[in-house]
Structure formats: structure tokens, C-alpha cells
Amino acid sequence: MAATKNKNATPTKRITPHASTPRSESITRPLGFSRYAAKGFGTLYLVHNEGGLAFIEFDLEPAVRLVGRRQEIECPAPLKAALDRYFRGEDERFEDVALDISGTDFQRRVWEELRRIPYGEVISYGELAERVGAPTATRAVGNANSKNPVPILIPCHRVVAVGMRIGGYTGGVRRKVDLLRLEGLQVDGDRVRRK
């Protein structure tokens, strides 16, 4: 995950349960992090701010770097319950999970559109670019996708390359394949089959 601050980022926009209605807030410092053992997937390290979940990391070191000396905290019950449902293979949209993330206006537009991709479906980077009103900005959309601070909750894994090829994933291609398969998609080699 990209744990570095974006110099062009605007103040934190708290993504409310309905991602299309972000609110501006001042940037908050992380309270700490919690661990979530995702059955069959590995451990997720969840970084929490006062306003909600700020980052999901796939490795401990980036999470510790983000929170500094702050203590490990218990995973909030609504987040744990939502992750439990998702990793049981249920269509979980994470609408009741408070997010406290920051990014540029363009990144937030991309992330909001990612939340609209239904569970178990994929779209291409080109389709995503069209949906955010920037049909020639496929690379910029891919870059915004890679800066997503809360993968899984904002499902950047549901975006694939031209020809239904897997493409990249900040958490690693193996994790992307595992998430797509969990959602019922077939992955043969480097290609995804739509339902």
C-alpha cells in the first residue's frame, strides 16, 4: 500500500457510508492499528484514525510505520463483522464502515466509482476511466487505483486490464486472484471470466 503522503492531496475527505457524499475534515493522526485474520487470505493490518478506517496494509511494517509508537487496538466490531461476512463469501458492501481517507479530487472520484462496482463483477481500467468522465486517462485511473488506501473495502481488485487480463495489484497479483475467486469469478492463467 502507498503509505506516503501525497503532496497534492487536499485535506482528508471522510468517505461516508455512501461514498458519493464525502465530507471535508482536517487530517487526523492514526490512533493505532488492529489485525484481522482473514480466513484463507492472511492477516490484514487496519490503521484507524479518529474518523474511521484510514488504511489497510497487507504487511505489518507499513502499518507500524503509519501509527508510530501507538498501541495495537481492537478491531471495531462493525468493521470486523463486515470483514467476516466478506471473507465468508457474502456480498458485503462495507456501507456501515466509517472511512477516514485522503486523496486528490481525482483519486476520490476514482475510489467512489470503484465502490459502485458490484460484488463478483469486474470492469477494465478503460471502463473505469469512462465512468469517472476521463475516457483518455486510463493510466491516471490505474495510478489512482494503486493509491487506494483501503483495498477490499474500496474494491480496486475488481478492475482488470484490456482483454480481461488480471493486471496489477498493489497487494500482489496472487491476492487479487484470491479476492476475485472469493467473489465467484473464474481466473484461468492471467485472464478473468465474467459471470
Image: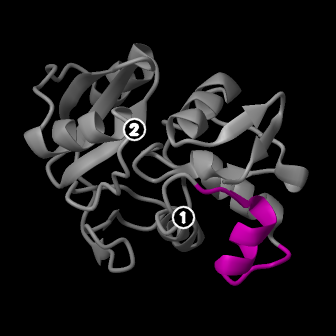
Structural distance between the alpha carbons of marks 1 and 2: 16 Å
Residue 114 position, x and y percent, is 54, 63
Residue situated furthest right in the rendering: 163
Q: Position of residue 184 (x, y in %)?
A: 56, 41
Disc sitting over residue 89 in the figure: 2
- The question of residue 61 being in magenta is answered with no
Q: Amino acid at mark 1?
A: Ile
Q: Which residues are magenta?
A: 121-136
Query: Which disc is residue 104 wearing?
Result: none
Graded by Cα atoms within 10 Å as few (under 14), some (14 to 19) or many (20 or more), the crowding at tag 2 reads: some
In terms of image quadrants, where is residue 35? top left
Instruction: Using the image as rendered, state which of residue 189 and residue 54 is in the foreground.
Output: 189
Q: Is residue 14 above or below residue 20?
A: above
Dots 1, 2 in contact, CB < 8 A: no
Q: Residue at x 43, y 17 (%)?
A: 40
Q: Is residue 185 above or below residue 87?
A: below
Which secondary structure lies at badge 1?
loop
Q: How many marks?
A: 2
Q: Is residue 163 left or right of residue 30?
A: right
